[in-house]
Image (tube, grey):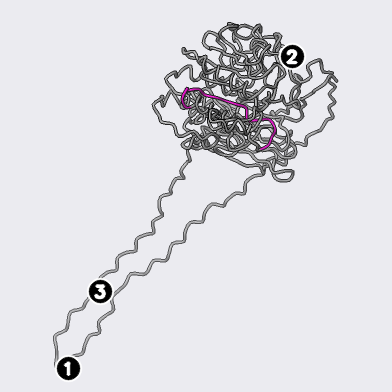
Amino acid sequence: MEYLKQDPNIESVEVDFEVYALSNMHDYAPAGKEKRHLEEETPSGIEMVNPTGLQQGDNNVTVCVVHTGYDNDHIDLPDLNAIYYGYSPYDGETWNHDGNGHGTHCAGIIGAIGGNGKGVTSLNPDPNKLDFFTSKGLRDSGHGTLSGVLSAVQKCVDSGAKTISMSLGGGGLSNITNDQFSGHYGNDGVLIMAAAGNEGTSDYNYPASYASVMSVAAVNNHGVSTNFSQYNDQVEIAGPGILVNSTWPGNKYALMSGTSAATPHVAGVAALVWSHFPQCSNKQIREALLQSAQDLGPVGCDEKNGYGLVDAQAAYNYLNERGCDFEVGETLGGCNQCQECSSSPTSSPVAFPGCPDDQKYFKLSIVTDDYGSETSWRVTSSTNNNIASGSGYLSNNVYNERHCIPNNACTFEIYDSYGDGICCGYGQGSYKVWVDNVEKGEGGGFESSEVVELCAITPIMPTTPAPTLLPTPLPTPAPTLFPTPVPTPLPTPVPTLAPTLSPTPSPLTPPTPAPTLAPLNPPTPAPVTCVTVKIDILTDDYPEETEWNILDKYGNNVASGSDYNQRT
């Protein structure tokens, strides 16, 4: 290699790294396990990033998936022309055959056909409004070369792709790769996303960690960063990455977990939003996704979640209000990518992403204690109707709940079934509540329950009592003067009488205030009678679909069970 570097006709020489599909996190779901479908399903990840069901615009956007291929015969995926809509740099392996499955799974998140009564829907369910291109960057084995990936990416760009999704990684920093991606982003107007990595460390995974690439982290269904998701200063945005249901080769469907599943959620949202604003550049679409992301974890951009969970409706709202005439800063990547962005709960440009005008945005952050299953909560309306609720939490975890709730939903109440709150006897639990990104309350050191009022309450001003006037004393009369007697030889002076003063009034005694009554203690509740409940469950071939809860009359979760993983 040193010999080649000395050749004046060769610009640069680098090692052709091995690149591979990021592994499915087997702790969460077996790779390729077929999932049954009784009817078409909207996967939970789609609902998380597109909660209001934003529809595709009238302008087709070409999305390219660089992975292990595409099952072109799948009944729930668009049927692509085998000549024009794919590419493979590997001899003997075609793009329209996916012997691995990962590529087909990623493609289904972006563009599985909706409304056909089959399998799953997607972020871009109308195949007539989405153009797919598939580049087989990896072989059927799930492995490939860096040169193969770069060739696949170049073919995507040459075929008109505006968005590229890569759920792969491997090797180290490559100047050749960085230059190619920088050119596609800066000159060709292409938006590129890649998986942050599944090692659960702060190491940089490439190609995700290049500044011209959006590095995508994975969160669970509660918006909490997963323990396998890579974290560093290049992580830029997050997507759902736990038990993501999507298409699988052979007309099957599979649950998969990892940043590789989170990445196509961001790519799919980018294509969906871009279809409404074709005049926007790739840099403006990127900024809109960051500006409107739902803040997760610590306030603002952080190394685990970037600017937060991608939100289709919020990004649409941002561009619909601002248009595409704004300037974008230099390309730095990660939390430095958008210096003017702020995803803090108090200053996000989108006040409450995705909620209709007659509803408000409710956010709850819970840190559970050592007994997470004892914690539950609910939001009720002014008529005491249950609007939203949550329970069944794991211990010592962080959960972020987000809901659009009616404007008359005024009461939040959190419960602890044991009666010792969530702090601080058995762990350092806490909670915090926002409405329309305005903090309404926080706590943790309660007993059985605690209430936070969500609606603005006009304070009742105390009536100012009229002042008590003291009686005005009578005026003091002027002194009575006697006439001066005519002088005589021996004048006898008449003594001058002192002025007659009115008596000084006695001070008034202030009225005695009414006695303050001690508050009455609430009646002591009747003792709770405990009973022993035994539950025997014989699971079927799909035990992960089974769960149960026991609630008391107040809606508190008393006991629950789930996550069964074998036929027992």
Q: Which of marks 2 and 3 is nearer the N terminus?
A: 2
Where does residue 322 sit, x and y in percent of width and height?
A: 41, 27
| Amino acid under disc 2 | Glu
Q: In this picture, which residue range is highlighted in magenta?
A: 186-201
- Residue 505 vertical placement versus 89 (above, below): below
Name the residue tied to disc 3: 479
Say what secondary structure mark 3 lies in. loop
Of residues 307 and 401, which is closer to you in this image? Answer: 307
Of residues 499 and 454, which is closer to you in this image? Answer: 454
Say which mark, if any, is on residue 34: 2
Q: In this view, does 39 lie to the left or right of 151?
A: right
Say what secondary structure mark 2 lies in. loop
Where does residue 258 sit, x and y in percent of width and height?
A: 68, 26
Say which mark, if any, is on residue 490: 1
> Mark 2 Cα within 10 Å, few/some/many (few <14, many 20+)?
some
Magenta stretch contains residue 198: yes
Residue at 61% across / 37% down in the picture?
A: 232
Locate residue 492: give its quadrant.
bottom left
